[in-house]
Image (tube, helix red, strand yellow):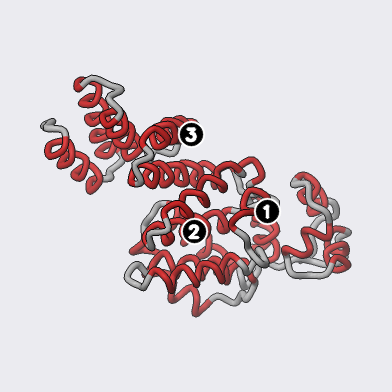
Amino acid sequence: MKMKEGLIRNMRKSAGLTQSQAAAKLHMSQQHFSRIEKGEYGMDMWDFASFSQIVGQSGDDFSVLYYDSEEYVDYLEYRRINRLIRDNKIDEVRAALPDFEKKTKSNRPMIQQFIALAKVITNEDAPRERLLNELQQAIEMSIENFNEEKIADYRLNYTEILIIYEIALKLFDLNEQERAISILSTTIKGRKSFRATESEKSTALPQLMYALSNFLGMTKRTQEALDVSCEALDMSIKCNNLRSVPGIIYNIACCKDILKLAPPNEIKSLLLEAYYCAKAIRRYELADIIKKDAESTFGIKID
């Protein structure tokens, strides 16, 4: 379907991209993209979804333009699975993914990259080396010759951020702790250049910071872990993203206890806050873990 003249151009310019840069990310020629901007050529569902990701804007406001498209059902399912991943509902993602992969009519790099990521996330029992290789292939679908040292220079969209997050997790599991820490730190430092929606940023940033605080704590870099945990807590509250908050507060309690920065009554208060916060947002398994650790590690009984 043809787009209204000026819409795509304005979205591109607002993201600070040239025609050449946008066209390259969409895997089309600059000439073809130029004609789209002029309203001479149209964009199908997946090109428009890809473009929205590239410029860091939501395509929801414009999706009504495509209600008659045969691909629209696929697109709605893509959005549903994406939300399930954000909510960490892995079993539901695992159940939905095979049918989606089989039925989707799109072969766009954007959707194939998303499927590759979802497969890794749901394949928890596979060897970490294999999953790491699959993640490397997935990130290079959109970032050719991906270089970890240049992460801060990339204008990452939400899917790319999640892939890098998963790469860090797998590296840490493979005892490449410093490399994993470096990847997360560099990604967080480059957050101002993220090409993601505000909603996506509010999901990704606390998640990245929470993982980094865990990694730093497990490698005995306690003061750094505390600093990142405090920043992660502020970020989570600012973004109204409560999912990581109980774990972050628990990390703060552990770090302060190790560093002897708080008296026992303050540590107890933090542990109680972490426990009841986990219960409030229905993360019951995490609440049980915090309760058991409070009793076994700190000698604090939580009723």
In the image, taking residue 32 as reference, residue 196 lies left or right, namely left
Amino acid carrying mark 2 in the image: Asn
In the image, taking residue 53 as reference, residue 9 lies left or right, namely right
Figure check: 154 above or below 40: above
Q: Nearer the viewer, mark 1 or mark 3?
A: 3
Q: Nearer the viewer, residue 266 or 118?
A: 266
Secondary element type, mark 3: helix
The residue identified by callout 3 is 235
Secondary element type, mark 1: helix
The residue identified by callout 2 is 82
Q: Residues within 10 Å of mark 1 (few under 14, many from 20)?
A: few
Figure check: 33 above or below 231: below
Viewport quadrant of the N terminus = bottom right
In the image, taking residue 206 as reference, residue 151 lies left or right, namely right
Instruction: Point out which mark residue 72 bears.
Output: none
Q: Of the two numbered discs 3 and 2 on the same chain, state the one appearing first in sequence.
A: 2
Q: Nearer the viewer, mark 2 or mark 1?
A: 2
Q: Residues within 10 Å of mark 3 (few under 14, many from 20)?
A: some
Amino acid carrying mark 3 in the image: Met
Instruction: Point out which mark residue 62 bears.
Output: 1
Q: Of the two numbered discs 2 and 1 on the same chain, state the one appearing first in sequence.
A: 1
Secondary element type, mark 2: helix
Q: In terms of image quadrants, where is residue 35?
A: bottom right
CB contact under 8 Å: marks 2 and 1: no
How many angstroms separate mark 2 from mark 1 (CA)? Answer: 18 Å
Q: Nearer the viewer, residue 26 or 142?
A: 142
Find residue 137 and report its horizontal and vertical position in percent. 56, 71
